[in-house]
Image: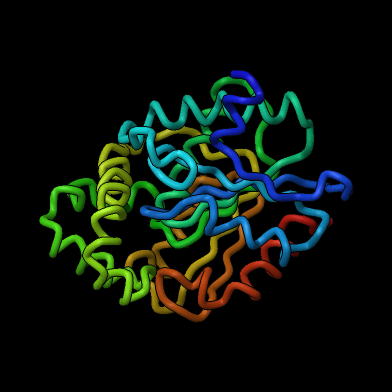
């Protein structure tokens, strides 16, 4: 994969004149895109270079068909990662929220299985450990009205947007594609990862409770730690300052 091709998948807003110690790849939640993470670069520790993953079908890639095959996405992201790391070598880590946490986890396993360089740290946020996921959920098949109410339950989309029919006509296809992507995921038992895993959980998150998040410990044979924040599923927005401070501490410790 060329640098130009991989650039479509990544938005890296860092100032190239600043020396970075570590690159953090951020994977978005269902219905989200890279712009959710881009502002973090201004607020996170400057030693960290942030690279936000932009999936097809949104943002500057809105004309492209969304990806609904989980394995295809992981294989493609593996190529993207290799191209970026080859062209701009730097120690790196993964952060993913909700669906993005699954993507980050499986991409780390894929890197291991391919014999590639591994992320130095995996941070999973707001996502049940893979064996706990409900395989029967097919939210992408819900009628529009029910799907909108499901989004309202997640509390990550402002009510004025959910009530805007014109805007929702644009957003719902992306949401459906991401929920289809999640439905296509099937966990396969494998050896724990030999890298540190950290979990971020919201105290009031009934989609991925702090107790359920603890199950991620089974997937780490290296260091494991967990952090709980006030808020529900989108605590990463509600408690953004604390989340970014904790990210910086976790990634730059030692």
Residue 74 picture location, percent across and down: 46, 31
Question: Total marks drawn?
Answer: 0
Above or below for 170 versus 183: below
Residue sitting at 54 percent across and 60 percent down? 199
Query: In the picture, which quadrant includes the N terminus?
Result: top right
In the image, 27: left or right of 73? right
Above or below for 158 versus 20: below
Residue 201 picture location, percent across and down: 49, 68
In front: 152, or 21?
152
Image-quadrant location for residue 81: top right
Residue sitting at 27 percent across and 69 percent down? 162
Above or below for 189 versus 236: above
Residue 41 visible in rendering:
yes
Residue 222 visible in rendering:
no
Residue at the limit of the structure toward the front, as seen here: 166
In front: 12, or 45?
12
Residue sitting at 66 percent across and 33 percent down? 118
The chosen color scheme is rainbow
In front: 247, or 58?
58
Residue 105 picture location, percent across and down: 50, 42
Residue 233 picture location, percent across and down: 40, 69
Residue sitting at 32 percent across and 48 percent down? 174
Image-quadrant location for residue 85: top right
Query: In the picture, which quadrant includes the C terminus?
Result: bottom right
């Amino acid at each position: 994969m060329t640098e130009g091709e991989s650039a479509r998948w990544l938005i890296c807003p860092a100032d190239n004149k600043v020396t970075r110690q570590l690159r953090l790849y951020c994977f978005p939640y269902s219905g989200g895109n890279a712009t959710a993470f881009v502002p973090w670069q201004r607020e996170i520790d400057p030693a960290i270079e942030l690279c936000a993953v932009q999936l097809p079908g949104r943002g500057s890639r809105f004309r492209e068909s969304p990806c609904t095959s989980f394995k295809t996405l992981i294989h493609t992201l593996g190529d993207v990662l290799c191209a970026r790391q080859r062209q701009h070598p730097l120690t790196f880590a993964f952060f993913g929220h909700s669906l993005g946490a699954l993507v980050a986890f499986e991409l780390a396993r894929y890197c291991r299985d391919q014999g590639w360089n591994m992320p130095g740290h995996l941070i999973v946020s707001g996502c049940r450990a893979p064996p706990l996921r409900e395989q029967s959920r097919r939210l992408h098949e819900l009628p529009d009205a029910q799907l909108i109410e499901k989004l309202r339950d997640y509390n990550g989309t402002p009510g004025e947007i959910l009530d805007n029919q014109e805007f929702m006509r644009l957003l719902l296809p992306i949401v459906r594609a991401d929920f289809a992507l999640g439905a296509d995921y099937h966990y396969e038992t494998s050896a724990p990862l030999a890298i540190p895993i950290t979990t971020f959980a919201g105290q009031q998150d009934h989609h991925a409770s702090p107790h359920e998040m603890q199950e991620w410990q089974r997937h780490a044979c290296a260091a494991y730690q967990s952090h709980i924040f006030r808020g529900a599923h989108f605590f990463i927005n509600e408690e953004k300052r604390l989340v970014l401070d904790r990210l910086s501490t976790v990634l730059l410790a030692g």
